[in-house]
Image (tube, grey):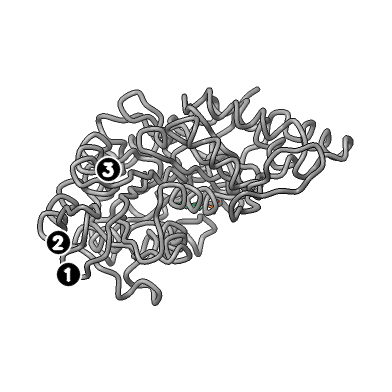
Amino acid sequence: MNIEHICQFIRDTFQTDEFVPLHAPTFVGNEKRYVMDTIDSTFVSSVGKYVDEFEQKIESFTQSPKAVAVVNGSAALQMALYSAGVKQGDLVLTQALTFVATCNVLYHLGAQPIFIDVSETSLSLCPNALERYLNQHATITERGCIHKTTGQRIKALMPMHTFGHPAEMDELGVISKKWQLQLIEDAAESLGSMYKGRHTGTIGDFGAISFNGNKIITTGGGGVVLCASSEAGQHVKHITTTAKVPHAFEFYHDEPGFNHRLPNINAALGCAQMEVINELIASKRVLAMQYREFFAGSDFQFVEEPCYAKSNYWLNAVICPSVESRNTLLNETNSHGVMTRPVWTLMHHLPMFKNALRGDLSYSQWLSQHLVNIPSSALCVDR
Ligand SMILES: *Cc1c(COP(=O)(O)O)cnc(C)c1O
């Protein structure tokens, strides 16, 4: 299979001779109507009906006890970690193979990542690698889980559902209980992805979803914190809205709050997008099956959902047979107007995380030299 053949398949699939982006948003429903409604009513900002409506739509879609809409996925992660009690000097176990936002939020909380390898099953945090690391480097004391070499507290475990494919949550859940770790799911990419019948982001203590323009649905910019209890959810809502105590006219705030609430105009876009989410996911799964069939029997291995999961197939990916073929695929597709991307530079190769603690990362390393993401926008969605 040559690259020309791949480009042609992608052009035929998306039915275009023009530039094919990696992931474009789809607006086929009430987006304009709802956004215009916020402008006509003047309620574009912190007051208006769409934020509540959007949170309710997310709750019923994910079966989360409480969803809190915020300005972006990074803020959602920050609120999840903050609410889980991650503090200055703490360590958090996560992946080196992730988007930088996962680790940036740790940095800004004064915490540090410990990088664990990803598994071949899910491309997400590997339970076996995690267990091996903890057995070797951690101990349980009256202060909780402690890193034996640095004496720092290991407070939380933060798997990321890579490209929408659910991580091995049962195994990670058992480990997080055993080692007294808060479990926070970076579900930024996995709205609509199910782990054994449960929505990703609702399995741990907190989950964070992103509605950035390249995600499966978008609010322009936006995110949501999924909380395992409605009490935790009420507190997240409180701190994202300046921790103001409700009163007819007084301004009284009972703790240091944030201004992270999603504006009404963005929530309006989100409400319209949630009306078509099922069609979008169905369409993305059709696209993934077309890719799977196309690459079957070739040198390129199409990345499929784990057998226990139903993935939203947010970003499709192929694993190339060699580093050379990976480089050729990237060069040839991008120079012919078909956008493809390598996986993110591994976090421990970025200057701000180069000294972070880590286990063996050989599979992450191998993937970073072989994996390529291919165009993944939803195909035509009929309304
Ligand atoms: C997109 C993304 C985020 C951040 O979301 P923003 O809305 O862009 O802030 C965090 N983690 C992962 C894995 C992501 O893909």
Residue at mark 1: 149
**Looking at the rendering, in which quadrant would you find the C terminus?**
top right
Which of disc 3 and disc 2 is earlier in sequence?
3
Residue at mark 3: 122
Label 1 to label 3: alpha-carbon separation: 30 Å
Residue 206 visible within the image: yes
Residue at mark 2: 137
Secondary structure under tag 1 reads loop
Q: Quadrant of residue 380?
A: top right
Q: Nearer the viewer, residue 80 or 308?
A: 80
Q: How many marks?
A: 3
Under mark 2, the amino acid is His
Tell me, yes or no, whether the two marked residues, 1 and 3, touch with CB atoms within 8 Å.
Answer: no
Tell me, yes or no, whether the two marked residues, 2 and 1, touch with CB atoms within 8 Å.
Answer: yes
Crowding near the residue tagged with mark 1, few <14, some 14–19, many ≥20 C-alpha atoms within 10 Å: few
Label 2 to label 1: alpha-carbon separation: 7 Å
Which of disc 1 and disc 2 is earlier in sequence?
2
Q: Nearer the viewer, residue 234 or 264?
A: 234
Q: Is residue 279 above or below residue 201?
A: above
Which of disc 3 and disc 1 is earlier in sequence?
3
Under mark 1, the amino acid is Thr
Percent across and percent down for residue 297 are 23, 41
